[in-house]
Amino acid sequence: QVHLVESGGGLVQPGGSLRLSCAASGIIFSANVMEWYRQARGKQRELVATITSGGTTNYADSVKGRFTISRDNAENTVYLQMNSLQPEDTAVYYCVLGRHYWGQGTQVTVSS
C-alpha cells in the first residue's frame, strides 16, 4: 500500500518561509518523479514544481527563484522550501509520486 504523508503547512506572514515535507512508503521512491501541486480556493489545481529521479527540477513561473524542490532518497522524502511567500501562494499543497499517487494535501495560508 502506497502512502504519502505531508507535513509543514500552516499560517505564515507575507515574506516568510515554510518547508513542506512528504514522506513516501510502499513504493520504490528513488525511481519516481515527484511533484508538488497546489490548489487555491476557486481556482484549478496547478503544478508548482517537479523533480525527476535524476534530480532535474522544473518550476512554475510564479514560484521560480522563491521555491526549491528537493528529495532525500534515503529518507523517501520530497521537500518544498518556500521563501518570500505572498498571499497569492495561499493554497492547499499536494505532493504527487510518479504522477499517480497523491498525498492528502496540506494548507498553506499567507496572511498578515
Image (cartoon, rainbow, N blue to C red):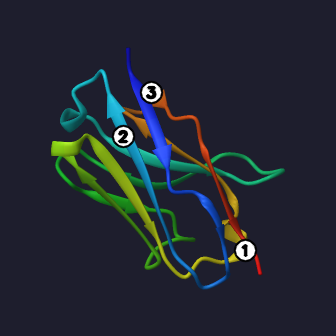
Do residues under tags 1 and 2 come within 8 Å of each other at their CB atoms? no
Q: Quadrant of residue 24?
A: top left
Left/right placement of residue 54 relative to residue 104 reads left
Specify the quadrant of the image occupied by residue 87. Answer: bottom right
Badge 1, how many Cα within 10 Å: few under 14, some, many 20+?
Answer: some
Q: Which mark is first along the chain, 2 or 3?
A: 2
Residue 38, position in %: x, y? 61, 51
Count of numbered badges drawn on the protein = 3
Q: Check disc 1 and give the amino acid type.
A: Pro
Above or below, 106 relative to 29: below
Q: Nearer the viewer, mark 1 or mark 3?
A: 1
Compare marks 1 and 3 and give the one earlier in the sequence. 1
Q: Point out residue 80 in the picture as x, y percentages from the top left corner.
A: 42, 60
Furthest residue to the bottom?
Answer: 15
Residue at far top of view: 1
Residue for badge 2: 23
Cα–Cα span, label 1 and label 2: 26 Å
Q: Residue at x 72, y 46 (%)?
A: 44
Name the residue tied to disc 3: 100
Whole-number angstrom distance, CA of label 3 to CA of label 2: 15 Å
The residue under label 3 is which amino acid type? His
Foreground label between 1 and 2: 2
Q: Nearer the viewer, residue 44 or 41?
A: 41
Task: Find residue 102 and name its label.
Answer: none
Nearer the N terminus, badge 1 or badge 2? 2
Please, what is the three-letter code of the amino acid marked with disc 2? Answer: Ala
Q: State yes or no: discs 3 and 2 in contact (Cβ < 8 Å).
A: no
Q: Quadrant of the C terminus?
A: bottom right
Q: Nearer the viewer, mark 3 or mark 2?
A: 2
Observer-nearest of 11 and 104: 11
| Label 2 element class | strand
Q: What number is the disc on residue 87? A: 1
